[in-house]
Amino acid sequence: MKKIFKNWDGFLIVPTILLFGIGLLSIYSSSFGKGDFSNFKKQIIFGAIGIFLMLLFSFLDWRIFRDNPYFLLIVYFLLIIFLVLIFFFGPQIRGVKGWYKIGELTVHPVEFVKIVLILLLAKYFSKRHVEMYRIQHIVLSGFYVLVPALLVFFQPDLGSVLILIAIWVGILIASGIKLRHFFILCFCFFLILIFSWSFLLKEYQKERIIAFLQPKLANPLEIGWSHRQAKIAIGSGGLLGQGLKRGSQTQLGFLPEPQTDFIFSAIAEETGFLGITILFLLFGILIWRIFKIAFVVSSNFPRLFAVGFSVYLMSQIFVHMGTNLGILPIVGISLPLVSYGGSNLIITFLGLGILGSISKELPPN
């Protein structure tokens, strides 16, 4: 038993468990405002499942993903089918058809797409990194991202689309994309943005972006409400916060979605600058450890997986906190390991378990 615990990567497991604990504490506190503790109870179950999977996958050999590309493709195409079927069988929740409802639980298939996409792209480029001068590899890998991105866009879930694209671009850069191809890619993204604004974005999405760019034009009781309340919550936290169960914005219902999209603001209000500093420190340790794995590991697949997963975490952290601070438009992204939600939490734990398996092969310090 002592030998088993010795092989665990403490720099991955300890900050992960502490971040989950902070999120659980915040969900518990905000539940008092509504008088409903169902999300808190479900988060405990999700966390238990996630921790079990993290420990299980840390004991498995990560090579099973590298050596079974057809399995990854089968899972990928099954998830694409689930993304298609969701338009017919998924309930509409807050204007989005992005979940399957199973009893009292909801399953968000795009979260599973993210981890499979990281594995698939890591496998694809681990064999072709020396051929990155061929633009065909960029185009072909782009189709792996394009299909789920389009399906998710029309749910509509713009935030998850941005995360999928960030994962792809991050792995492309780590694989050694040529600078000329990178600038061509940026130009293509610019054209897509122009086209999306004219023909694809819904009115409320445009209003959120306009409210972000020109906040004075936004109605503070409508589109500008969420940003305003989030900023008030963060600002009122002070140094030590107002205390658990005492945050006025969180407990009185002024702060929208304090357990998911705006949990950062809820934590800032009730624990203050000290709580947010601890949050940043734990995320910093976790990201540092993942990057260390990426730089030290000796083969391409685990390196690219570590880079892809770090981009997955960092992009979600950046977008979530940026939304809460009012420096980014609202796109509905949860804070990894902290926000309420089973699909994202379990997949994050699972990915960290794979990294735990990879870290066992690192040379001793």
Image (tube, helix red, strand yellow):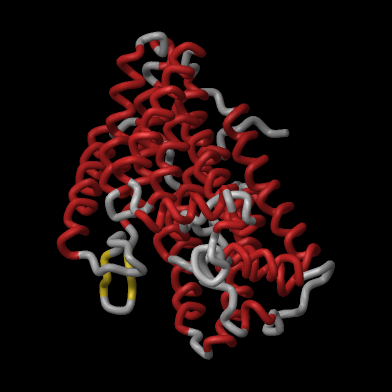
Residue 56 appears anywhere in the view: no
- Look at 76% across and 71% down and name the residue there: 236
Left or right: 151 with respect to 292?
left
Query: Above or below — where is 56 with respect to 144?
Result: below
Left or right: 1 with respect to 186?
right
Left or right: 139 with respect to 245?
left
Query: Above or below — where is 49 with respect to 25?
Result: above
- Counting from the top left corner in percent of width and height, residue 329 is at 53, 52
Question: Which residue extends farthest bottom?
Answer: 35
From the viewer's side, name the closer residue of 117 and 237: 237
- Counting from the top left corner in percent of width and height, residue 61 is at 43, 40
Image quarter where the C terminus lies is top right
- Counting from the top left corner in percent of width and height, residue 23 is at 60, 68
From the viewer's side, name the closer residue of 320 and 46: 320
From the viewer's side, name the closer residue of 359 and 349: 349
- Look at 50% across and 51% down and name the residue there: 210
